[in-house]
Image: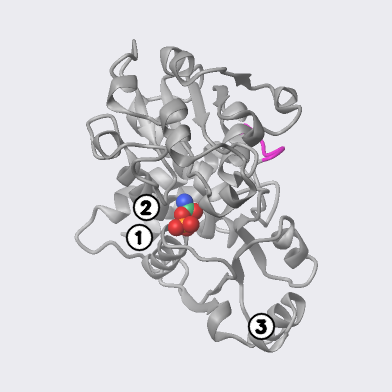
Amino acid sequence: MELKSRHLLGLENISPSNIKMFLDTAFSFKKVLQRPIPKVPTLRGKTVVNLFFEPSTRTRFSFELAEKRLSADTINFSTASSSVLKGETLKDTIRNIESMKIDLVVIRHSSPGAALFLTQCVDASVINAGDGTHEHPTQALLDMMTIQERLGKIKGLNVVIVGDIKHSRVCRSNIFGLQAMGAQVGICGPGPLLPRDIEKLGVTVYPSIEEAIAEADVLNILRIQLERQKGGLFPSLREYRNVYGITKERVDQAKKKLLIMHPGPMNRGVEIDSEIADGEHSVILNQVTNGVAVRMAVLYLLSGKNSSKIIKEST
Ligand code: CP
């Protein structure tokens, strides 16, 4: 089986078979990561550049670690230490870096479409590590991997995404990916944080968090983007917690054993209470662990490797 694209820009319109290929490959790499020496020579000789124009902890570290585990050579770029501060454009930045011969580019940028733009400037394969409010495909893949691992399936589950739906690239990628894999997707959040016409994406809109919790198998809780609160999108953080916060009292009302997810970074005591974030239902740190395996799979497959060779090459 082949990937339809040599880039990973998003999960919109991706085929279920391509998602399955990424997930199956990630599960194989997870076994590699559990070995005493969690490293394979698979991408030896390949060069990956990590272009992070926006802050990141989880995504940046897990891409860097994935690249090291695959034995790739890496270059790390961050705005604060680059000539972008002297006014160099994104196009000139990447064309200069590409002149040094690179194979793959990982980009995080605040502008939706920045990853797509890069594909028009370079020959290397481009991986979107989050572009503005557009998509964050590797986050959705690691979320799906975690659901598959914990619940044994994705198809038929009801996954409810809670919070700032409107500004969330994680939400968009999850909606596209989960629906492709046969899950039902629900959303729940304050009206000003829901995109207009969201129903057109085929999601169920839950009017209250209590109704969402009553029907969900999985809750994926989004970060309240505090920087957007300046715009007065909801009355106060206390009000948000009172109406939408994932508290023990609310989770205890669930009829099923809920899986609690959060892409991070969390605002404890706002969208999620510490008792839940650190509690028995939470798989938040498992998501982070799976992020390394997913990013290894994405790097490996986009570099033109065949998934059936992983275990053989790595032994
Ligand atoms: N989930 C996520 O993208 O986290 P970072 O912003 O820390 O990379």
**Residue at position x 65%, y 63% from top?**
126
Task: Check disc 2 and report its element: helix, strand or loop.
Answer: helix
Q: Earlier in the sequence, mark 1 or mark 3?
A: 3
The residue to which callout 3 is attached is 84
Q: Amino acid at mark 3?
A: Val
Magenta span covers which residues?
12-16
Of 73 and 139, the residue lying toward us: 139
User: Horizontal placement of 7 versus 307: left or right?
Assistant: right
* Residue 295 in view in this figure: no
**Residue at position x 60%, y 44% from top?**
168
* Residue 248 in view in this figure: yes
Dot label at residue 314: 1
**Residue at position x 51%, y 58% from top?**
300
The residues bearing labels 2 and 3 have C-alpha atoms spaced at a distance of 41 Å
Q: Is residue 217 above or below residue 220?
A: above
**Image location of residue 13, percent across then percent down:** 72, 37
| Quadrant into which the N terminus falls | top right
Q: Earlier in the sequence, mark 2 or mark 3?
A: 3
Of 217 and 86, the residue lying toward us: 86
User: Horizontal placement of 253 versus 140: left or right?
Assistant: left
Q: Is residue 224 above or below residue 241?
A: below
Mark 1 and mark 2 in contact (Cβ < 8 Å)? Answer: yes
Q: Nearer the viewer, mark 1 or mark 3?
A: 3
Q: Nearer the viewer, mark 2 or mark 3?
A: 3
The residue to which callout 2 is attached is 311
The residues bearing labels 2 and 1 have C-alpha atoms spaced at a distance of 5 Å
Q: Main secondary structure of the magenta part?
A: loop
